[in-house]
Image: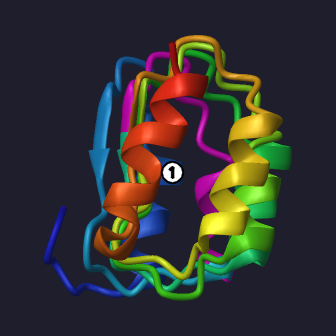
Amino acid sequence: MSFCKIGENRILESLILGDWPKLRYLNLWDNEISDEGLVILSQGNWPRLKTLNLGKIKVTSVGIKTIVDRSNWPRLKHLCLSENSEINDEALQILGQGNWPLLKTLDLGSTGVTKKGLLDFALNLNWPNLNELIVPSSMNDFTQDLLLYFLK
């Protein structure tokens, strides 16, 4: 569904009303989904969901809080939030509270996260399987050394 541009309500209505118990991969990259849409999305009962791409939508810390508090995706391994400039340090701290123990990859490329936010996140990391953290390109030098220490 990436690049569909069919609008928040139509995409989410199809997802929530449909029966998708075996859904493993959901790519919503560059669609018109906002924080309000994430309220609907978080109601999806997808116990096998492994990859969720929410890159370049229109999410803020409010939407992040919604998916952290309401989603039931116990097998989530890959989460892409890149190209969401409104994702900042506050959103990252909220995201870190998510109950996704199998999460391996978190893509924060082209977001508003700062070095301080990443450091705070790394110090409070509760995802034992996280082994790939993609960060804004302006921080590559900083993160390569520091975060690898925490992701051992």
Residue at the image position 44 percent from the left and 33 percent from the top: 19
In the displayed structure, 61 sits above or below 18; it is: below
In the displayed structure, 95 sits above or below 148; it is: below
- Asked if the magenta segment contains residue 40, the reply would be yes
**What residue type is disc 1 on?**
Leu
Q: Nearer the viewer, residue 30 or 47?
A: 30
Q: How is the image coloured?
A: rainbow
Label 1 residue SS: helix
Please report the bounds of the magenta region as a residue range.
Answer: 36-51
Name the image quarter holding residue 59.
bottom right
Residue at the image position 21 percent from the left and 86 percent from the top: 5
- Asked if the magenta segment contains residue 49, the reply would be yes
In the displayed structure, 25 sits above or below 67; it is: above
112 sits to left or right of 93:
left
Image location (x, y in percent) of residue 17: 51, 51
Residue at the image position 15 percent from the left and 77 percent from the top: 4
Whether residue 23 appears in this view of the structure is: yes
118 sits to left or right of 20:
right
Name the image quarter holding residue 20.
top left
Label 1 environment density (alpha carbons within 10 Å; few <14, some 14–19, many ≥20): few
Image location (x, y in percent) of residue 47: 55, 18
Residue at the image position 39 percent from the left and 24 percent from the top: 50
Image location (x, y in percent) of residue 91: 73, 67
Whether residue 39 appears in this view of the structure is: no
Instruction: Identify the residue under disc 1.
Output: 17
Image location (x, y in percent) of residue 112: 54, 82
29 sits to left or right of 99:
left
Q: Nearer the viewer, residue 48 or 17?
A: 48
Report the number of discs.
1
